[in-house]
Amino acid sequence: MTDKSSTKRESFSSLKRKAVLWVRQGISPRRLALTLALGFAIGCIPVVGIPTLICAALALALRLNLPAIQAANYVVMPLQLVLIVPFVRLGGWILSSVRNQQAMGGALLHTSPLNVMTHMASLAGQAMLAWLLIAIPAVVLMTLTLTVVLRRVPALAASEARG
């Protein structure tokens, strides 16, 4: 048990050192808040495997802190898996195709692989629509909230005052 607790402590101290490095890079609280909010939101995309690539591309395109956005993405990875079904259901509700989904469930057992793939792509599209409608206001709210919180961190407040 001691090994696990010491490993957790080492992991936490490593994360703490990385956070200090991010702060020393001169990133403003608002910019760091946006980076973290985007990482959290993108990390919840209901299609497994693409958030890491999207976070990297977005960080490079917008000149955001790549380690910070990826850290936020990885933190919410378990939440991504939990939210897949609710996003599919919400997307189906938005598109009013819930009855079609229930009727198709049994029919998928007796259909071609192409029809199954088409149906799965439809479900993924519905989930992405629901995610998009939730992610946009979530990013705005998280950015505002995190900006207020991060401005209370002395090293970040100092970098904002300089910039």
Image (tube, helix red, strand yellow):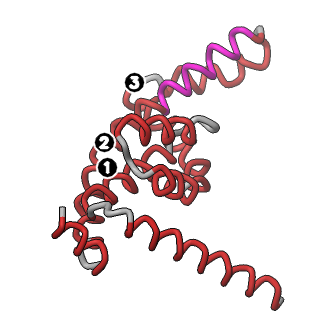
Q: Which residue is mark 1?
A: 139
Label annotation for residue 95: 3
Name the residue nearer the viewer: 92 or 150: 150
Residue 115 painted magenta? yes
Regarding mark 3 in the picture, which secondary structure is present there? loop
Tell me which amino acid carries mark 3. Leu
Q: CA distance from mark 3 to mark 2?
A: 19 Å
Badges 2 and 1: C-beta atoms under 8 Å apart? Answer: yes
Relative height, residue 112 to residue 96 (above, below):
above
Residue lying at 20% horizontally and 66% vertically, measured from the top left:
160
Q: Estimate how packed mark 1 is, as few (under 14), some (14 to 19) or many (20 or more) residues with alpha carbons within 10 Å.
A: many
**Residue 154 sits in which quadrant?**
bottom left
Looking at the picture, how far across and down is residue 61, in whole percent?
39, 34
**Residue 145 sits in which quadrant?**
bottom left
Tell me which amino acid carries mark 2. Ile
Looking at the picture, how far across and down is residue 79, in whole percent?
55, 55
Q: Estimate how packed mark 3 is, as few (under 14), some (14 to 19) or many (20 or more) residues with alpha carbons within 10 Å.
A: few
Looking at the rendering, the stretch of residues picked out in magenta corresponds to 114-127
Looking at the picture, how far across and down is residue 102, in whole percent?
59, 27
Residue lying at 31% horizontally and 53% vertically, measured from the top left:
34
Q: Which residue is mark 2?
A: 136
